[in-house]
Image (cartoon, grey):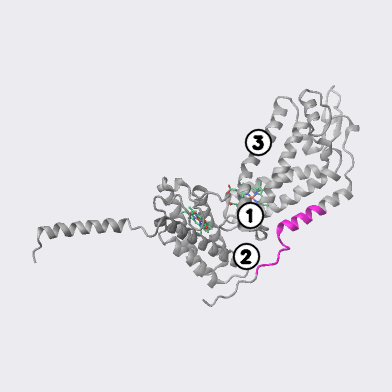
Amino acid sequence: MRKHPIAVLFGSFVAVALSGIASAQVVGKVEDQIRWRQSAYQTMAWSMQRIKANVEGTFNKDQVTQAANVIAALANAGMGALYQPGSDHGRGWRETNVKPEFFKEGEKVRELAQAFNREANEMAKVAAAGDAAAVKAQFGKLGESCKACHEKFRKEEK
Amino acid sequence: MCGVFPGKTPPPRRAYVWDLPTRLFHWALVCCVAIAFVTAKLGGNWMAWHGRVGVLIVALLVFRLAWGFVGPTYARFMHFLPTPRALRDYLQGRWQAQGHNPLGALSVFALLGVLCLQAGSGLFSDDDVAFAGYLAPLVAKATSDRLTFAHRLGEEVLLALVALHVGAIAFYALVKKRNLVAPMITGWAEGRPEESTRGGGVKPFLLAFCLALAAAYGASGAWLPPPPAPAAAEW
Ligand code: HEM
Ligand code: HEM
């Protein structure tokens, strides 16, 4: 079937418009985004505490694996999508603590986020292997990658 | 003594000003604070050592506070209170005594005070990632957040005070040609023997030492009820 030129034009217009929407797919209002990212970080904090408790107390491989997988899942979740322009201000569970530089130094953010990604994935691997000493060492590296970003891009709660 | 000063110059007369506990305290504090800084900057699992050396610092500070009341002459706070009059005398060049001069005394009080605040706030701090002070469970998170903020602020204040302290000592060494470091190592300074420090025997020492031990125990949180064993979650 030969398409009418107008139909072709219309079709390509719709396709372009749709792809435009797809690439700028923003889920949630600013306050939703802030609330979600705060929640995600709190969930990571919970998991870090679980790993720590297991390293310092009796080591339970299953619990460590659960916690490590949660962190890895969030690290691989593409949380960058929760930092839309305009979300440098606003209130989630509380006023956002992201620094304005976060939105200006994209290169540095990516670098820190990728370092965190690597350490989180490594943590999941090490947890699955079940060696407590290795878990402890990787826990230290993972925590450093969290703090590296906080130091640069997270305001302090006063 | 004469062997140290050969030749025709008569041996200078000396006074024993810094007692051994005060000197040990001083250099132990220097080492511990340096370690606290380095471990905090290293982060990661080094934070565990930051906490441990922090507790040691608490003990040292409590020892010094007690020694400042029951210790020998020149270790006593009452002896080197930087009163306005003492400061005026000193600045006009009329101050003549052993021990801390009034300006140095200001620096000592400032350093001790800020270190107490720093160690005290650290006990309740939380980095939100992997390490919290041993007493953080005792306070609300909002309180801990505020103390964490203070603890981080303390870093700069402390660095400034240390720079001032070391700078003043360097000034004395280079400009006034007076070595203040050697007396803090050997205990002996230029002066008359009858000016030597007095008091602070074994009993006061034991008192200060026991207070320091008690403070370390309190700061370590070892007395807090242990957290319940993690429950096996079915889901
Ligand atoms: C496992 C590692 C991490 C842990 C445990 C962690 C923990 C936390 C916690 C507990 C909060 C407070 C959330 C709230 O306000 O309720 C937070 C906030 C924050 N974190 Fe992390 N974090 C981690 C990794 C990262 C990384 C890698 C980055 C940088 C890409 C980062 C950037 C931030 C920012 C910008 C905020 C403020 C969010 C806002 O208020 O909008 N964090 N984090
Ligand atoms: C006078 C002794 C101490 C000094 C000089 C000191 C110094 C420091 C410094 C420089 C930092 C890094 C702040 C930053 O990240 O910019 C820090 C962080 C920290 N310190 Fe201390 N500290 C002392 C005592 C303590 C004690 C006794 C504890 C608790 C046992 C403690 C717990 C902490 C915690 C939890 C952090 C992490 C805070 C954060 O990153 O948000 N500190 N300290």
Q: Could you tell me if the residues under marks 3 and 2 are in contact, i.e. CB atoms within 8 Å?
A: no
Q: Which mark is residue B202?
A: none
- Image vertical order of residue B143 relative to residue B24, above or below: below
Residue located farthest toward the bottom when viewing the structure as drawn:
B234
Cα distance in 3D space between marks 3 and 1: 30 Å
- Location of mark 3 (residue): B163
Q: Amino acid at mark 1?
A: Thr
Quadrant where the N terminus of chain A sits is: bottom left
Residue located farthest toward the right when viewing the structure as drawn:
B194
Query: Which chain hosts label 1?
Result: B
In the rendered image, which quarter is residue B10 located in? top right
Cα distance in 3D space between marks 2 and 1: 26 Å
- Location of mark 1 (residue): B143
Number of the front mark, 3 or 1: 1
Residue B202 coordinates in the image, percent (x, y): 88, 49
The boundaries of the magenta stretch are B210-227
Q: Which mark is residue A56?
A: 2
Q: Secondary structure at mark 3?
A: helix
- Image vertical order of residue A85 relative to residue B182, above or below: below
Q: Secondary structure at mark 1?
A: helix
User: In the image, what residue occupies the spot 46% across and 63% down?
Assistant: A72
Q: What kind of secondary structure does the magenta stretch mostly adopt? A: helix
Same subunit, tags 3 and 2: no
User: In the image, what residue occupies the spot 78% across and 30% down?
Assistant: B84
In the rendered image, which quarter is residue B112 located in? top right
Of label 3 and label 1, which has the lower sequence position?
1
Same subunit, tags 2 and 1: no
Same subunit, tags 3 and 1: yes
Mark 2 crowdedness (10 Å alpha carbons): few <14, some 14-19, many ≥20: few
